Image (tube, helix red, strand yellow):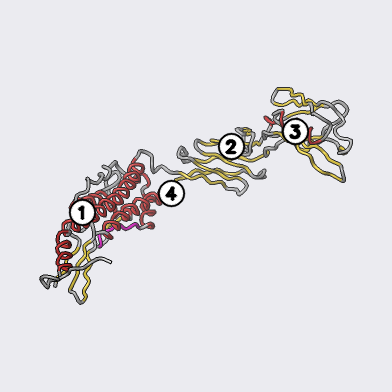
């Protein structure tokens, strides 16, 4: 074990003295460590705030583009037809009737015994204006199916069990509608069409002198109206009305999202600016949030609040008139009912004028002290 000479000559606790001196000498290093931790905390907090401001800027830029709020939704008067609208959709309506649904051709062979196998050596499939000669490796039905599928003749084959050791081959077009029609010929056998190739068909302006048939290889008719497509699920006995109207719910959601983005920033800044006091036997300790007293953050917060309260529309109107107001706590409040009523009363005023996007935060600087202790 080591030899200790503590206080041997002088009677002093030299070990304690040396320890105290080392602790005093380490104070600058400890302060630097705490300062580095505070700086890292500030950098992390500023990065979080910058991300929220950038996200709000993206939202605001998108909403300020011409036509950004020209949102429309498409509906039909029948549950047998669905409609979808893109950003290119414009308000309007049209009547039509679904007279046919699209079909994919299905053809089957006569019953074949698996032991006997396919009794023919070749078959010819005519599809898409081309003739494909199919030559199976053997008479085994699985080889016939494989050969047909490998030919890429616009037809897929499958083996269907219809009894003990009995099968029928089914041939299905790979395309729906008339474009997928095909014929099969094989000497000595006949093929039966279970389903014929058929395009979907609608009649525009049915029952009038202007009635006109429109076809589609699928049950979807793209851009029946600009930016609007319909999908038929059943043939309709009566005319169906397709209506494209302003999407008030979508516009309201966009406005509400902007308010939520603004409040998200206010909430984030407030959570990191809170000053709290704690009293214990050692006295009262006051701790300030990382953003407390930071003028740059306070400026960003104020700039966003000012931008959010500027007049909107033409002629300019206060946001409070359309349901967007500032609360006593300095946050934004969105009144959906008031906004919807304003939108219905004056839809032309909904397009906001362009605004300057919130600026990116400045480079971080060392934070002020975060705590003090009173005796």
- For marks 3 and 1, the one nearer the N-term is 3
Distance between the alpha carbons at the discs numbered 4 and 3:
51 Å
Distance between the alpha carbons at the discs numbered 3 and 2:
35 Å
| Number of other residues with Cα within 10 Å of mark 3, as a class: few under 14, some 14 to 19, many 20 or more | some
Q: Position of residue 368 (x, y in %)?
A: 17, 57
Distance between the alpha carbons at the discs numbered 1 and 2:
54 Å
From the image, tell me which residue sits under label 1: 298
State left or right for residue 78 relative to residue 4. Answer: right
148 and 371: which is toward the camera: 371
Q: Which residues are magenta?
A: 329-334
22 and 31: which is toward the camera: 22
From the image, tell me which residue sits under label 4: 250
In reply to whether residue 333 is colored magenta, the answer given is yes
Disc 1 to disc 2: CB gap under 8 Å: no
- Of tags 4 and 3, the one toward the viewer is 3
Distance between the alpha carbons at the discs numbered 1 and 4:
33 Å
From the image, tell me which residue sits under label 3: 146
Q: Position of residue 52 (x, y in %)?
A: 32, 50
166 and 44: which is toward the camera: 44
Q: Residue at x 21, y 69 (%)?
A: 277
State left or right for residue 11 relative to residue 151. Answer: left
Q: Secondary structure at mark 1?
A: helix
- For marks 3 and 2, the one nearer the N-term is 3
From the image, tell me which residue sits under label 2: 221
The vertical placement of 29 against 188, above or below, is below
Disc 3 to disc 2: CB gap under 8 Å: no
- Of tags 3 and 2, the one toward the viewer is 3
């Amino acid at each position: 074990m080591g030899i200790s000479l503590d206080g041997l000559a002088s009677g002093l606790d030299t070990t304690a003295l040396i320890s105290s001196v080392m602790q005093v000498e380490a104070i600058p290093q400890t302060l630097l460590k705490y300062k580095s931790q505070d700086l890292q905390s500030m950098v992390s907090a500023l990065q979080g705030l910058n991300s929220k401001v950038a996200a709000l800027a993206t939202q605001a830029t998108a909403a300020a583009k011409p036509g950004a709020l020209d949102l429309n939704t498409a509906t039909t008067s029948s549950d047998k037809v669905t409609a979808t609208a893109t950003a290119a959709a414009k308000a309007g309506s049209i009547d039509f009737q679904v007279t046919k649904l699209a079909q994919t051709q299905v053809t089957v062979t006569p019953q074949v015994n698996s032991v006997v196998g396919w009794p023919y050596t070749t078959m010819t499939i005519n599809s898409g204006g081309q003739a494909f000669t199919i030559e199976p490796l053997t008479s085994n039905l699985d080889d016939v199916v494989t050969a047909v599928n490998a030919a890429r003749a616009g037809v897929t084959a499958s083996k269907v069990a219809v009894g003990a050791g009995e099968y029928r081959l089914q041939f299905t077009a790979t395309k729906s509608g008339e474009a997928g029609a095909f014929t099969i010929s094989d000497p000595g056998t006949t093929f039966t069409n279970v389903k014929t190739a058929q395009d979907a068909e609608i009649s525009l302006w049915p029952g009038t002198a202007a009635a006109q048939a429109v076809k589609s290889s699928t049950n979807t008719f793209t851009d029946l109206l600009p930016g609007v497509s319909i999908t038929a699920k059943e043939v309709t006995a009566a005319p169906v009305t397709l209506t494209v109207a302003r999407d008030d719910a979508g516009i309201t959601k966009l406005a509400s999202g902007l308010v939520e983005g603004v409040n998200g920033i206010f909430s984030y800044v407030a959570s990191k600016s809170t000053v709290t006091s704690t009293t214990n036997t050692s006295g009262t300790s006051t701790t300030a949030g990382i953003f407390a007293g930071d003028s740059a953050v306070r400026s960003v917060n104020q700039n966003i609040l000012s931008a959010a309260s500027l007049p909107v529309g033409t002629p300019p109107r206060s946001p409070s008139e359309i349901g967007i107001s500032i609360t006593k706590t300095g946050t934004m409040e969105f009144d959906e009912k008031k906004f919807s009523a304003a939108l219905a009363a004056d839809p032309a005023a909904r397009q906001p004028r362009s605004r300057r996007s919130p600026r990116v935060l400045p480079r971080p600087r060392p934070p002020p002290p975060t705590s003090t202790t009173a005796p």
